[in-house]
Amino acid sequence: MKQGEFLSTVLPFKDKLYRLAKRILVSNDEAEDAVQEVYLKLWKNKRSIKNYNNPEAFAMTMTKNYCLDRLKSKQAGNLKIVHSNYPHSQNVARQIEANDGVALVFKIMETLPEQQKIVLQLRDVEQFEFAEIAKMLDSNETAVRVALSRARKTVREQLIQYNNYGIS
Amino acid sequence: MELAKIEQLLEAYFEGNTTLEEEAILRAYFTKTNVAPHLQQYQPIFAGFAQAQGERSVREIVLPKGPKTASRWWVGIAATLLVAIGVFGFFNQEPTLTAEEKEALAAFEKTKEAFKLMSQNFNEGAEELVYIQKFKETKNKILK
């Protein structure tokens, strides 16, 4: 497989890989590094990529696994980098008041268990079907739904809690 | 979209029982400006997801140059083999000679043999010289 052909297969979902990596690793830099690593691995295994009927799902799984590994080694090295830099939406007028709430939602998402974080990202941000998510996570649809429900409820509860106490 | 429907969808949403289409309806509703006051608390959730969706990777992917990685290993082996064959061939060179050179070589061998024979005889002769030395010693003893 030529590099051009390879890139046209795998580049369309680069941003999705990046966002998943960022959701897990939080830091922009770490997420970019992770995406680069995943693409290198994909490139090295480019012969087998044709055998996967869904390279996107395959790449998402790889990204997830790579990021979780990174997280493990980072925690082992006691090096938890946390810095959040959210891009600004173009729709400034409406976003201004909602911004505190949105920042809060991101903060709450960071505190979710990894699996819930990933499911929430894949469903509510990337809008994958449950079957696809289950395949990516090597899980089943019921488990995905349960994790998703927990994640959504946690976000809701924490958001309400923060708002009630006026901490935001 | 009537409010009751939205509330119903929202409930299903938190149970993880909505389809992608239903979630699209919820997203559309919550990104509008006229959200019912009691539902406004959910707005940041959907706004947050929309914002998360806008995140883009800004770094270029760097891949190693195409065919090089694939061919590098056998290029090394090929080079090693070539050198090995060269060295082997060099040391196993059969000297090819013309008739004249062969004749010269034969003559050289013959001469060598002759010299060898001569030196052998000469050495035998030299061994006999020991007696002369003995004679000299004895003579010195007497004539001192």
Image (cartoon, rainbow, N blue to C red):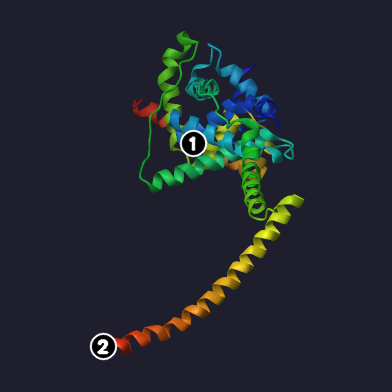
Point out the residue furthest to the left here. Answer: B144
Q: Position of residue B55 (x, y in %)?
A: 52, 22
In the displayed structure, A21 sits above or below B29; it is below
Left or right of A5, for residue A39: left
Element under disc 2: helix
Report if residue B96 is visible in the image: no
Residue at image x 66%, y 50%? B85
Residue at image x 55%, y 32%? A121
Q: Nearer the viewer, residue A42 or B91?
A: B91
Mark 2 highlights which residue? B143
Left or right of B52, for residue B76: right
Left or right of B85, for residue A152: left
Q: Amino acid at mark 1?
A: Ile
Element under disc 1: helix
Q: Position of residue B112 (x, y in %)?
A: 61, 65
In the displayed structure, B36 sits above or below B122; it is above
Dot 2: chain letter: B
Point out the residue furthest to the right here. Answer: B99
Q: Position of residue B93 (x, y in %)?
A: 68, 53
Label 2 crowd bin: few (<14), some (14–19), many (20+), radius 10 Å? few
Residue at image x 67%, y 64%? B110
Asked if badge 2 and badge 1 are on a common chain, one would say no
Location of residue A158 (image quadrant)? top left
Q: Amino acid at mark 2?
A: Leu
Label 1 crowd bin: few (<14), some (14–19), many (20+), radius 10 Å? many
- Which image quadrant: the C terminus of chain A? top left
Q: Nearer the viewer, residue B9 or A129?
A: A129
**Which circle marks residue A54 in the picture?**
none
**Which circle marks residue A24 in the picture?**
1
Q: Nearer the viewer, residue B75 or A95?
A: B75
Total numbered labels placed on residues in the image: 2
Location of residue B132 (image quadrant)? bottom left
